[in-house]
Image: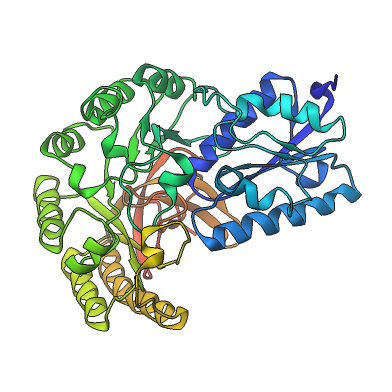
Amino acid sequence: MIDFSQKKFGIISLGCDKNRVDSEKLLSIIKAKGGEITSDAEQAEILIVNTCAFLNESRKEAIFTAIDCASYRNGKLEKLVVTGCLPQKYISEIYASLTEADVFLGTYDYDKFFEALEKSYSGERVDYVGSGSAEYCASRVLTTPQHYAYLKIADGCNNHCTYCLIPKIRGKYESYEMEKLVAEAENLGEVSELILVAQDVTRYGTDLYGRKTLTELMDRLSALDNIKSIRLLYCYPEMIDDGLIKAIRDNEKIIKYLDIPLQHSEDRILKLMNRRGSRESYLALIAKLRESIPDIALRSTFITGFPSETEEEVEALCEFLRQAKFENCGFFCYSKEPDTAAYKLKNHITDAVKKRRVKRLYGVQHEISTAKLSDYRGKKLRVLCDGINYEKNCFEGRAYFSAPDIDGKVYFNAANAVQGEYYDVIITDNDSCDLMGKTEDYYG
């Protein structure tokens, strides 16, 4: 038997914030076993790569990361574990070729982590994909700054968008029990910002309770003393109803921000994507949200270069952006993924054209964002301090209209600022993404 309490463990988490939560739960299993956790990969005796496989580029990154990590065998590394979405979907393809890895685990196999690891120490390469119980784990070792944390409220997806592999990697939509989520959130400690994530948070409860129960979950979470505010990511437009709008408007702990992945604006492309909305319904929803919650910040993501997309449809999407006036947007080139319905469509578009279209869309959004941010000049803005930016020699933080990692920042000078605390910042300047300012007590 291996005494794992004498081993140092490291983890590299790739992909989305939902993957990050999985990594944090695996770290809690390691910690419960007595293992030491290190953030320095070179010091790890057992190194885990938690992978993403959503796009071809994600799969390449996962494989190259695993290969790079194998170089640590020249130092202290004894075992390399590859887990997550890549082995979950592609184990039959990567097991024989990715010989750098000693252990493979899927997305729901963490309860078998030490069993698989023990077996690998006997000299075998181990494939434990699909062996786990998928049992819910409430314990976490946070890898985010201590003042904010993600709470994954569901896994999988039922939407079957024609470009997306998620249902074939993660399976059907599965909500986690509300009692367990509330207990998990309560055990996170003092959290300035709790960020709810799932492939579609607005669908929460439909499978488990037979109805949408996101607003009930929000009420339960906001009643916790240790949770100071709550942010919602990934809200599908067709699932946003009057009850959710009212809950966001009336609950002081809910940040007035919604991330609504629309993916396109034009009806023909939306139909090809198997999206349920339309240009008209999207604009109506945006208008309703802004009328019901005047200060709400809206974010979205869009895919361009979808098979058969025309230049006219791209220009129409540009005009849609000008009408919608999102605070923040992300734009992505369509990725031709095997095992998706869109893979078989005709009239695929070249990479060069897709990249040009992404650049065009970002150009339009930058104009919108610059104008919106310019309105804050000379005004006082409430900012959550995320820490010190040593490169810029100032503090950095976020206003309510910015989520961590994906949106812009507020860079500010202050006599003093503490991570996780809020400050009133007078805005002095901006670009297309970020704001600059200072607190009233700063005289530099």
Q: Quadrant of residue 196?
A: top left
Look at the image and tell me in which quarter the N terminus lies.
top right
Regarding residue 93, the answer to whether it shows in the image is yes
Q: Which residue is drawn at 88% across and 42% down?
A: 76
Return the x and y of residue 184 as percentages of the image width and height: 46, 22
Q: In which quarter of the image is residue 128?
A: top right
Q: Which residue is drawn at 38% across and 74% down?
A: 358
Q: Nearer the viewer, residue 362 or 175?
A: 175
Return the x and y of residue 32 as percentages of the image width and height: 67, 19
168 vs 80, left or right, is: left
Q: Quadrant of residue 222?
A: top left
Q: Which of 121 and 37 is in front in this view?
A: 121
Outermost residue on the right side: it is 74
**Vertical placement of residue 174 versus 61, above or below:** above
Regarding residue 433, the answer to whether it shows in the image is no
| Color encoding of the figure | rainbow
**Vertical placement of residue 428 versus 135, above or below:** below
**Vertical placement of residue 35 versus 333, above or below:** above
398 vs 62, left or right, is: left
Q: Which of 122 and 143 is in front in this view?
A: 122
Q: Which residue is drawn at 80% across and 51% down?
A: 70
266 vs 93, left or right, is: left
Q: How many marks?
A: 0
Return the x and y of residue 386 as percentages of the image width and height: 49, 46
Return the x and y of residue 87 as percentages of the image width and height: 61, 45
